[in-house]
Image (spheres, helix red, strand yellow):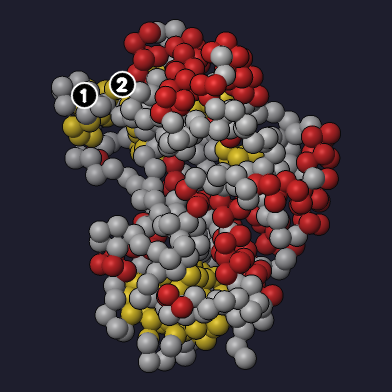
Amino acid sequence: MPDASHSSAPRQLDVAIVGGGLAGLYAIHRLRGLGLKVRAYEAGSGIGGTWFWNRYPGARCDVESLEYSYSFSDELQQDWKWPERYGTQPEILRYINHVADRFDLRRDVQLNTRIKSALFDAKANEWNLTTEAGEEIRARYVVMAAGNLSTPRVPDFKGIHDFKGKWYHTGLWPHEGVDFTGKTVAVIGTGSSGVQMIPIIAQQAKQLTVFQRTANFSLPARNGPMGEEKERKHKAEYPARRAAAMETPFAIGGHAKPTQKTLDVPAEERAKTYEAKWAEGGSISYLYSYTDLLVSKEANDTASEFARNKIRATVKDPKTAELLAPKDHPIGTKRLCLDTNYYETYNRPNVALVDVRSDPIAEITPSGVRLASSAQYDVDALVFATGFDAMTGALKEIDLRTTDGAVLRDHWEGGPLTYLGLMVSGFPNMFVVTGPGSPGVKTQMIASLRGFHALTARGGSSITSCGTAGLRARS
């Protein structure tokens, strides 16, 4: 909906929600059900959060579509049809907009509105929020649903603003798209977004140079059209699957729990298991091969080396293969990437990999990238797949403080501290969704919203350690 007209009197709410993505929309639905007057403030020109902003080539969820969806309405999860095993950015955004329309959520979303400051008035026992346009909002509670991957991190390379070509960040991708046909392109970063976009850009570009600092493990997604029988069976088992997901470290169901320790299994049998998991596709099944893969380095080494050998067998140039094979962290200790033909892409004659750990980027020049060794790479376009100021970035962008003198930036100077990932001591009646301390980093995000559901349960226990109580309607 369009911007609200600003009046002289502050808008009075029960709950002000910062963010109009998956978390913010669910908060509207949930809090309305408690009889609360709510409104969400979204900086973008449309709802969707992560899936509104991240429109880079190949953007796709790494959690299977049937799992990466709301569970608060059985009719919704039965009716919606996902076309593929893993949802693309356009399809997920279409789903989010469908949910907003189906549950009439848009009337409580104010777009093109960035919250500049939030002050808790201890005497009045309410939050005073101010937008960049100067609008004032007063609310008994505030829900920070700004996302933990919503503040793009553009490296502060020397000379970046002198570059004569065009540069892009995956989290700020032009909505009209970018055509790299016939261009020389540099992609800086090989995390999840880089892994997804590199194969697509390689098909367009005249020459693609990838600058990698840290190699990441990536497993094949094995994406494809959604099978009718798979969809029918999954939807019939939704209650059990959702419950089972909550018993896993990843909040993703559908995978049988392992029963054996890695080294209790003969090496030949272990290799067959890893091979079957690799062929199945996806990351959770692979990490669920044995009970101790994530707690025993000796056990993890077997899974890590299997993945490295797959990279070596795929990438024809041995030097490139070794650069792509991670050796500085055990598999699964950083969030795994999923890909379609990522490693195969390095066999293309128009793709080159540059190791910037051994030869760091010194500066961005008007014509491209210069390394510490003075090696120069001239390009038409730069793409930064350098991620986000994760977890704390969105909250630190807001001047968040209390009349008692607490300032969130100062409070978190030595690192973020929260209560159960939901609240912050000294900041009453402020609730954080998928922020620092929440399970959101290692689990699928929509499932992590269930913590907010529990917090807002009617008659919930007081959270006395943070000096406030669970959200509920005024009596």
Instruction: Identify the residue shown where x is 45% and y is 35%.
Output: 295
Tag of residue 359: 1
Q: Determine whether label 2 and label 1 are within 8 Å by CB.
A: yes
Residue 371, position as x, y percentages in the image:
20, 26
Tag of residue 386: none
Disc 2 residue type (three-letter)? Val
Residue 448, position as x, y percentages in the image:
56, 55
**Considering only vertical position in the picture, is 59 above or below 281?**
below
Residue 250, position as x, y percentages in the image:
56, 44
Furthest-front residue in this view: 264
398 vs 27, left or right, is left
Mark 1 crowdedness (10 Å alpha carbons): few <14, some 14-19, many ≥20: some
Instruction: Identify the residue shown where x is 57% and y is 25%.
Output: 220
Q: CA distance from mark 2 to mark 1?
A: 9 Å
Instruction: Identify the residue shown where x is 64% and y is 79%.
Output: 459
Residue behind mark 2: 354
Residue 286 is drawn in which quadrant? top right
136 vs 100, left or right, is left
Q: In what element is the residue under mark 2?
A: strand
Residue 112, position as x, y percentages in the image:
49, 65
